[in-house]
Image (spheres, rainbow, N blue to C red):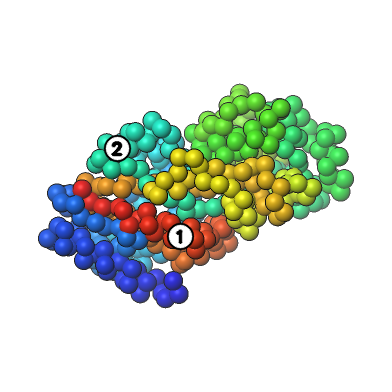
Amino acid sequence: MKQSIRRGTYAILAASTALVLAACGSSASSGDSGGSDSTAGGGESAASGDLSGNLAGAGASSQAKAQEGWVAGFTEANPDVTVTYDPVGSGGGREQFLAGGTLFAGTDSNFNDDELASGTERCAGGEVVELPVYISPIAVVYNLPDAGVEHIQLDADTLAKVFSGAITTWDDAAIAALNPDATLPATKITVVNRSDDSGTTKNFTDYLGQTAPDVWTYEADDAWPIASVQSGDGTSGMIATVGAAVGAIGYADASQAGDLGTVAVQVGEDFVGPDADAAAKGLDASPLTDDATDLRITYKIDRTTTEAGAYPLILVSYLAGCSTYDSASDAANVAAYFTYVTSEEGQARAAEPSVAGSAPISDDLRTKIDAAIAQIKGA
């Protein structure tokens, strides 16, 4: 969309309001109960002033900065909707959503079978909707101020040995061989992991398991699978912990790396750093999951790609909601917010370096997402 957010929201959302009004016989407002089959989707929501109420979400801390931008942009056009997002981590976000504590969740890892089954009750007989809205590289961040290079270069086996504790100092021969131009001290490597259940952890351990299976023998999981040396709660806790100790290494959404160093990982014969364009290429090289549907657009990231310029250590973070809500007004608000987030304006806002520096979704993916949002309705 090329028009302003306010005009674009009006044009997109007016049709949805008409549908909700026709189905419910009254305007959708906070607290409306779902007694009719009222459609709120169609990639649509309502014009500025036609939506109201509270829209609470929680989940992936990787999305925190993007969510700040999305909330600001959405409320400029919809000032009567109070949107909140608590970056408690992917696991906590899914748990709160399924318990009915929030209307949507942010998650860096897909809902499992048990969670999807629970979603039927939570979603008033409907099902969980999962939409990829945030594409970003996971940076391997380190605190080594005098290394003398833009990126420390690590292949998958060496990276896995560092995080498993097999390599313990920065001047180890394996690291030195990959970084002839770097100044590598004998400083002890302090591995930092996330202390909370985290989709970022699951994506990172999935990368290690796929690319270095002989070294990293643990399953991909939201929880760090081995004994912790140092840990941080959430993305901000990870960055703070690594930043506080020279020699520390961890993993976090690249947008929040700040002044920390970031690793260039080996892809084919080259080393690729964590930037948005490389992350987008990593997603393009990946297929959908076997159980993906028109409502759950979920990806299986190909971590072993050798595609030139692709960065396979990425997370695709999702917005999750319901295909059916008890309240028509909740359905309208969720559909409106999801539409803004995935619009050209919403994606461009998140892509700004001062916001999150993420990679915008493609037009083809947006078409699929719009079709999913079209199915969000009130019970």
Give percent across and percent down for residue 175: 81, 38
Q: In the picture shown, does residue 91 fall above or below 76?
A: above
74 sits to left or right of 29: right
Which residue: 68% across, 36% down?
211
Give percent across and percent down for residue 88: 44, 41
SS for dot 1: helix
Whichever of callouts 1 and 2 sits on the residue coming sooner in the sequence is 2
Name which residue type carries label 1: Arg
Q: In the picture shown, does residue 295 fall above or below 40?
A: above
Location of the N terminus (image quadrant): bottom left
- Residue under label 1: 366
Q: Quadrant of residue 357?
A: bottom right
CA neighbours of label 1 inside 10 A, class few (<14), some (14 to 19), many (20+): many
Give percent across and percent down for residue 185: 82, 39
User: Which residue occupies the foreground of this view, 240 or 174?
Assistant: 174
Which residue: 29% across, 37% down?
120
- Give the CA distance from mark 1 to mark 2: 25 Å
Q: How many marks?
A: 2
Q: Quadrant of residue 180?
A: top right
Which residue: 35% across, 74% down?
7
Q: In the picture shown, does residue 166 fall above or below 153?
A: above
- Residue under label 2: 120
User: Which residue occupies the foreground of this view, 102 or 1?
Assistant: 1
Residue 286 is labelled as none
SS for dot 2: helix
CA neighbours of label 2 inside 10 A, class few (<14), some (14 to 19), many (20+): some
297 sits to left or right of 278: left
Which residue: 26% across, 67% down?
15
